Image: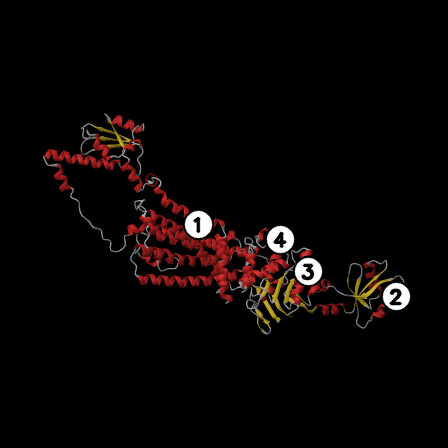
Amino acid sequence: MKRFWTVFEFELLSYIKNKSFVITTILMAVLLGGITFLPRFFDMSGMLGIETTNSQEESTDDGEEDKEKDVTSLGIVDKNGYFADKAILEQAFQDTEFIFMESDTELKQSVEEEKIAAGFYVVDDMNYQYFVLNRDMADSNQMIFNELLSVIHKQIYCQEHDIDYETFVADYEAPVQCEEKVLGKDAADNFWYCYALVIIIFMVIIMYGVMIATSVTTEKSNRSIEVLVTSVDSKYLLFGKVFAGAAAVIVQLTLILGAALAGYGINHEVWGNNLDILLDIPANVLVAFAVFGIGGFLFYAFLYGAMGALVSKTEDINKSSGTLQMVIMLVYFAVLFQLENPDGIIMKVCSYLPFSSYSAMFVRIGMGKVAFWEVCISVVILVISILFAGWLAAKIYRMGTLRYGNPIKLGKALKEMKQSE
Amino acid sequence: MKLEVKNITKSFGEKEILKGISFSVESGKALGLLGRNGAGKTTTIRILMDVFHGNSGEILLDGEKFNPRKVQIGYLPEERGLYPKREILEQMIYLARLRGIGRNQAVENSRKWLKRLQVLEYEKKLLETLSKGNQQKVQLASTLVCDPEIVILDEPFSGLDPVNSQILQEVVQELISDGKIVIFSSHQMSYVEEFCEDVVIINHGEVVLNGNLSEIKREYGKNQLVISGVGVTQADMEALLRRRLPELLEITGKTKEEVIVRLLEGVTRKQLFQKLAKMEELEIEHFETYKPSLNDIFVAKVGEES
C-alpha cells in the first residue's frame, strides 16, 4: 500500500507541476465564478436574452432617460382609426415609436428601405397584415398586436351589443386557478443541469482518459517502464496512476464547478433566478454525479491505461483506444437522446451496465423514478467492474512492458495473458 | 549471498533464445556476462529481473527461489530511460521509494550517489536538459540509490567517455569491496578484465565458457607460445613455421607482429626452442608463453563459427 501512495504522489505531482493544467483550472474557475458576478455591474439582458433584475430596475426607474435609449420605429396603416389614441400602442410596445401611414404600398416601401423595423396594415378588427424584412427568432410584435387587436375587437363587440366592457372582461377572462404540486421530480426543472453534467462527465472521461493512456505510453517510449516494473508490482503503478488522474479530475472539477455554483449561489437574485435550471443543482444529484462520475471515470481510466500499454508510441494511442472512444460516444448519444425518457427501457438497461451507468443512472436519479436498491445494485456492479478493469489493465500493462513496435491487438494480448498464467 | 542461475531456457514464439544458461556468483565478486549482439545476455538479465519468465530453469538466492522485488537490487537496463521532464532529484527519490526506502534516506542516498558520480549540481534540473553522458551518470546513480545488495548492469559502459568509464570502474570496484554481488554484461572486454573474477561467455543462447577468468586464461594459454624473429614479417614467419616445423606445432593465431603457436602433444618447449635456434636464417626475437587477453579468448570462442 505504501508503494501505491508513492506512485500516487509522484503521478499527482506531475499534474500539479504541469503549468497548463494549473492555469486552465484557475482560469476556468475564476472565469466561471466571475461571470456569475457580472450582472451586478452590467446589464446582461441584451447579451444573453435573459432578464436580469438589473435591467428591470433600469427600465422602471429611469423613466426620463428612456428616450435616449434605442427606439424602434414601427409603421401602421389604420384606416378605421382603431388606434387614434397612439398611447395604447406605445404602452403595449415598449420603446417603440409608431408612424402612421396612408397605404400598404408606403408601408411596404418603408419596411424595405428599413426606415421602419416592421409594419402593420390593419384591415378590420379581425384582420391585419404584418410586414417585416427579415423575421427575427424572437420577434414578438405579432403576438402583442394580436392581443391589442383582440381587445379592440372585444370593445367593438361590446359597443355593438351594448354590454359593459369591464363586466364582460371580468366574466370572460376570469382566471383559472391552478396550484402546481409536483410530487416526484419535475423533469423540466432537472433537464438542463442533467444535460450539462452528462456533457461534462463525457468530456472529462475522454480528455483524462487519453491523458492517462499517454502517461502509460510515455513510460514505454521513454523506456523507464523496465526500471519501474522491476522495482514494484505493476498493479501499484497502474492503480497509482489512475487514482492520481482521478484525484486531479476531482480537484479540477470541484474548483471549476464549485466556483460557478458558489458564485451563482451568491448572485442568484441579481440573475433573477434565471439560471436556476442550470446552476441550482440539488445535493442528491450532485452526490449521484460525484459517485457515478468518479466510478465511471475510474472504469474507463483503467481501460485507457490498458490501451496505452498496448502501444509504444504516443501517436498510436488513438489507434488502440478507438474502440473505447466509440463506446463512450455511443453511451453519450444514447443517454442524451433518452434524456427526456429517463424511465425508458434503454435508460434502465444502461443504468446497470458499467459502461454507461456513470451517466444513465445519474440521469435516472436526477430526472426519473429510481428506487434506492436499484442505485445500490448499480454501484456494486460498477465497483466490481472497476476492480476487474484495474486487474485486467495491470496485467496488460505488465505484459505490454518491453513490447515495442506495432500496436498489440487487444485480442492477442488477452490470449497471451491467458497462456502465461 | 550466492546467486545461482540454473539451466534457464526461453523461446520467443518459434525462436529459441536461451538454451540452458547456468552460472553462479557470490557476494564480493563480479561476474561478467559476455556475448556478441543477440547472444542472449539481455534476455538472461531480464529473466533474472523477472521482466520475462523463463520457459524452464530456476534462479536461486542462497538456495531459495529468487524474487527480485524482495531483495534490494540495483538494475541498470540496457534500454536506459527515466522521466525526461521531471527533476532529477525528484525522480531518484521516487525510484528509491518504489524500492521501499524511506523518504529521508532516499534524499540522502540520491545526493550521495549524484555526488559520487559528479552530477550533484544538476539535481534540480530536468533530466532532458543534461548531456547524454550526464544522463547516463544520473541513470547509474538512480540504479544505486536503493543501496542494493545485488547490482545488475546491462552494458554499463556504453555511451561513457574514458573519464566517465574510469569513474564507473571505481564505483564498481567499491561495490565489489563492499561485498555486493555485481553482474554485468558487456562486449568491452578490457573493462571486464579489470574487475571480473568470473566470466560467462554466451553464444547463441548457450554458455560456451564459464569460470574463473585467470584460470581460463591460464588454461587457454597452456602450451601456446608467441614467436617472432628479427627482421621477419609475421607472414614470412608463419610460412616458415608451417614449412619447417609442422611436426612440432600448429599455428593458432597471430598478434600484431607475432605468430601464436600451440605445441603438439608430447612436444616440449625445449625441443621447439632448439629447432628454432638451429635455423640459420632465423634470429629469434620473441619466444614466450602466450597470455591471451579476454578479447582473444572471446573472439576465439565466439568468432569460430562465424
Chain of the residue where label 1 is placed in the rendered structure: A
Label 2 with label 3: CB-CB less than 8 Å: no
> Disc 4 to disc 1, how far (Cα)?
36 Å
- Apparent side of residue A24 relative to residue A150 in the rendered image (left or right): right
> Disc 2 to disc 1, how far (Cα)?
91 Å
Foreground mark, 4 or 1, reads: 1
Of residues B37 and A292, which is closer to you in this image?
A292
Name the kind of residue labelled 1 in the image: Thr
Name the kind of residue labelled 4 in the image: Lys
Compared to residue B159, the image places residue B244 above or below, namely: below
Q: Give the image quarter of residue A138.
A: top left
Pointer 4 residue: B132
Pointer 3 residue: B188
User: Which disc number belongs to residue B277?
Assistant: 2
Label 3 with label 1: CB-CB less than 8 Å: no
User: Which disc number belongs to residue A158?
Assistant: none
